[in-house]
Image: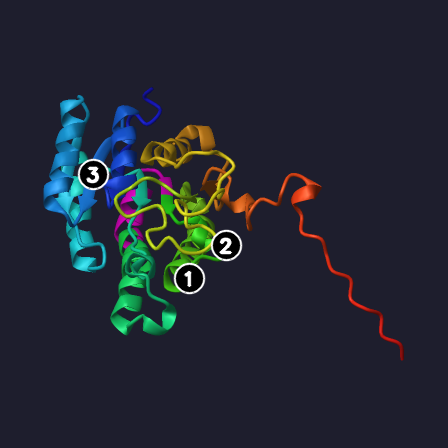
Amino acid sequence: MNRLREQTAVITGAASGIGKGIALAFAREGAEVVVADIDSSLGEATAREIQQEGGRAIFVRTDVTRPESVAQMTQATMEAFGRITILCNNTGDAVEARKSIRIVELTDSEWNETFDLGLKSIHNCCRCVIPCMIDSGGGAIINISSIAGTAPAFSAAFSAMKAGVIAITRSLAVQYADDNIRANCICPGAIRTPGGISVAKQGIYAGINNDRVRLIERFGTPEDVANAAIFLASEESSYITATSLAVDGGMLALVSNIPPRTLDSVPKRTKRPHKGH
């Protein structure tokens, strides 16, 4: 416990799902927590839950796609706690999977929405928070990507955006290493959240409609991701930066269905007749 004492963490998308799991876990480890989300009702509830457990937290309604909103959130954080040492960027939406549409059906606005929420948000937050982090003596940036950013998935725009999250994480690590800032990302697999577990039920990583898509036979939880985030935010990972950590139950190891265990179940290959010249 108290692995994050004397730390102040800004967590975007912290009203529910993975973000809420991280916010609660960080607070239990002693961090002051800023719940940044566009959903006021759920965001305030998350902050209250932390406070009721004896932690310190505030909710700041934030539209991470708008620079002015992120600037206001950053200012509110500094006024409340006087520092920012941890930034967890955790926003994104798999529009294609949610609507079960393919790339030819994806509108310009849906494409832009995907990249604004998943990538522009990181730019907005880093641009405002990193100067405060430098003034605080350094810190840790944790970006939430996805295994869809490293392996084929149904959602083309979402996959491209999440691959971009991995790339920008590495760049941040290089750019701010001399400022005592580490940057890493987490790539979750099938996590039980309101918008998770491959809502389209299509493709290799469909989750609930495949016989076997994980080595660990259960779905992940926000707590599983939060445990990884605590590690990457704490001094326990002080020699780790510019890396991606999969929290996927082994999904990335299964690029196709597990082959049959016995030769009896393997179809016999038909020999083709030899043709002479």
The tag earlier along the polypeptide, 2 or 3, is: 3
> Label 1, label 3: how many angstroms apart (C-alpha)?
29 Å
Q: State the CA–CA distance, disc 2 to disc 1.
A: 10 Å
Q: Earlier in the sequence, mark 1 or mark 3?
A: 3
Which residue is more in the foreground, 226 or 159?
A: 159
In the image, residue 149 sits, relative to residue 196, either above or below, namely: below
Residue at 41% x, 63% y is 156
Q: Main secondary structure of the magenta part?
A: helix
Q: Is residue 263 left or right of residue 105?
A: right
Query: Looking at the image, is mark 1 or mark 3 nearer the viewer?
Result: 1
Q: Which one is nearer the viewer's eye here, 260 or 37?
A: 260
On residue 151, which mark appears?
A: 2
The residue to which callout 3 is attached is 34
> Can residue 66 be found in the magenta stretch?
no
Q: Residues within 10 Å of mark 3 (few under 14, many from 20)?
A: many
Q: Mark 1, residues whose alpha carbon is within 10 Å: few (<14), some, or many (≥20)?
A: some
- Numbered disc 2: secondary structure: loop
- The image quadrant of residue 42 is top left
> Residue 78 location in percent, x, y?
18, 41
Picture quarter with the C terminus: bottom right
Q: Residue at x 28, y 61 (%)?
A: 99
Q: Which residues are magenta?
A: 126-141
Instruction: Residue type at mark 2: give it.
Output: Ala
Residue 233 on image: x %, y %: 38, 34
Residue kind at label 1, given as amino acid type: Ala
Q: Which residue is mark 1?
A: 160
User: How far apart in space, not on screen, are marks 2 and 3 (Cα)?
Assistant: 32 Å
